[in-house]
Image (cartoon, rainbow, N blue to C red):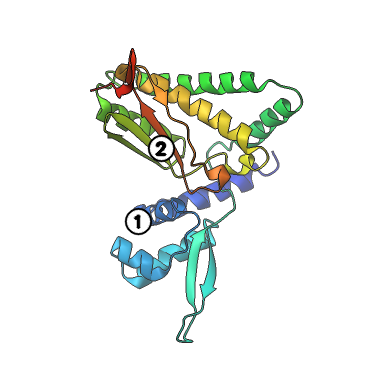
């Protein structure tokens, strides 16, 4: 507990940096494409800002550790362009401070020491279902129809820090996640960590989409742990006795 006061001060600093709506929007846009470099001109054009204002926001994000910078020389031999990209440093903050990373590592260590993979996946699935039920309980009524379910799933995923895009299209729910909250942990055992995270999300989806019929989640070949820029989950609702026809009309 020696760092409690110091940690709280750091949390206050980080939250103050992101308190500005424009700065938060800039940070989120960069976080959604972690491997892409941006310039002051890019941000100024995207958000309709004067370059000096865009530079100020980027500098504050860099000083807080949210972004890192590099330089790219121009073909004309002029002043190098300054490039900004998402920092690899894991930045979490909250009040009171939490140690979720430690808890996750302990859970993985216990599994590696002889725990059952199936048991771990079952626990993750149940935790996801509980999260889905919690979100439903906060609603005045159960969401009806694909668009309402997509909104609920998007809100839950947003609360999980997954930077989601959730769309109801062609009688299917298309879920795209642009941030992996287990990214650093997955480096140790990507197959296990991804399976645990997917089981959690499947539990959420089963509860949230219950009104649309039987849920089937297609295999996911796009994973951030395998070098992809995002994870994708396609949820379909085949009618009983006809697996090729989508329900939830």
Q: Residue 102 at what x, y percent from top left? A: 66, 35
Where disc 1 sits, the SS reads: helix
Crowd around label 2: few <14 · some 14–19 · many ≥20 (10 Å):
some
Residue 85, above or below 111: below
Q: Residue 119 at what x, y percent from top left? A: 63, 18
> 175 or 47: nearer the eye?
175
Q: Residue 197 at what x, y percent from top left? A: 54, 31
Q: Which mark is residue 158?
A: 2
Residue at the spot x=65%, y=23% of the render? 117
- The residue sitting at the bottom extreme is 77
The quadrant of the picture occupied by the N terminus is top right
Residue at the spot x=42%, y=43% of the render? 163
The answer to whether marks 1 and 2 mark residues whose Cβ atoms lie closer than 8 Å is: no
Q: Which mark is residue 100?
A: none
> 5 or 66: nearer the eye?
66
Crowd around label 1: few <14 · some 14–19 · many ≥20 (10 Å):
some
> 200 or 6: nearer the eye?
200
Answer whether residue 131 is visible to the viewer in this image.
Answer: no
Answer whether residue 157 is visible to the viewer in this image.
Answer: yes
The quadrant of the picture occupied by the C terminus is top left
> Left or right: 130 with respect to 174?
right
Check disc 1 and report the residue beneath it. Answer: 22
Residue 159, above or below 132: below
- The residue sitting at the right extreme is 113
**Reading the chain from its start, which is encountered first: label 1 or label 2?**
1
Q: Quadrant of residue 48?
A: bottom left
Residue 232, above or below 207: below
Q: Quadrant of residue 57?
A: bottom left
Residue at the spot x=44%, y=65% of the render? 38
């Amino acid at each position: 507990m020696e760092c409690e006061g110091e940690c709280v001060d750091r949390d206050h600093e980080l939250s103050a940096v992101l308190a500005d709506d424009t700065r938060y929007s800039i940070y989120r846009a960069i976080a959604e494409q972690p491997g892409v470099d941006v310039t002051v001109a890019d941000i100024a054009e995207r958000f309709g800002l004067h370059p000096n204002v865009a530079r100020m926001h980027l500098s504050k994000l860099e000083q807080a550790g949210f972004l890192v910078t590099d330089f790219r020389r121009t073909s004309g031999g002029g002043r190098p362009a300054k490039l900004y990209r998402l920092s690899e440093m894991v930045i979490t903050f909250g009040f009171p401070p939490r140690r979720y990373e430690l808890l996750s590592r302990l859970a993985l260590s216990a599994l590696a020491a002889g725990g059952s993979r199936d048991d771990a996946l079952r626990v993750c699935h149940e935790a996801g279902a509980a999260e889905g039920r919690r979100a439903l309980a906060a609603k005045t009524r159960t969401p009806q129809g694909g668009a309402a379910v997509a909104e609920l799933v998007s809100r839950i995923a947003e609360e999980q820090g997954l930077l989601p895009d959730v769309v109801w299209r062609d009688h299917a729910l298309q879920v795209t996640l642009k941030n992996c909250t287990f990214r650093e942990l997955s480096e140790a055992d990507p197959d296990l960590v991804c399976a645990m995270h997917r089981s959690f999300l499947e539990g959420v989806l089963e509860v949230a989409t219950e009104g649309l019929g039987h849920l089937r989640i297609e295999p996911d070949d796009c994973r951030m742990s395998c070098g992809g820029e995002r994870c994708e989950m396609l949820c379909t609702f085949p009618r009983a006795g006809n697996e090729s026809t989508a329900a939830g009309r």
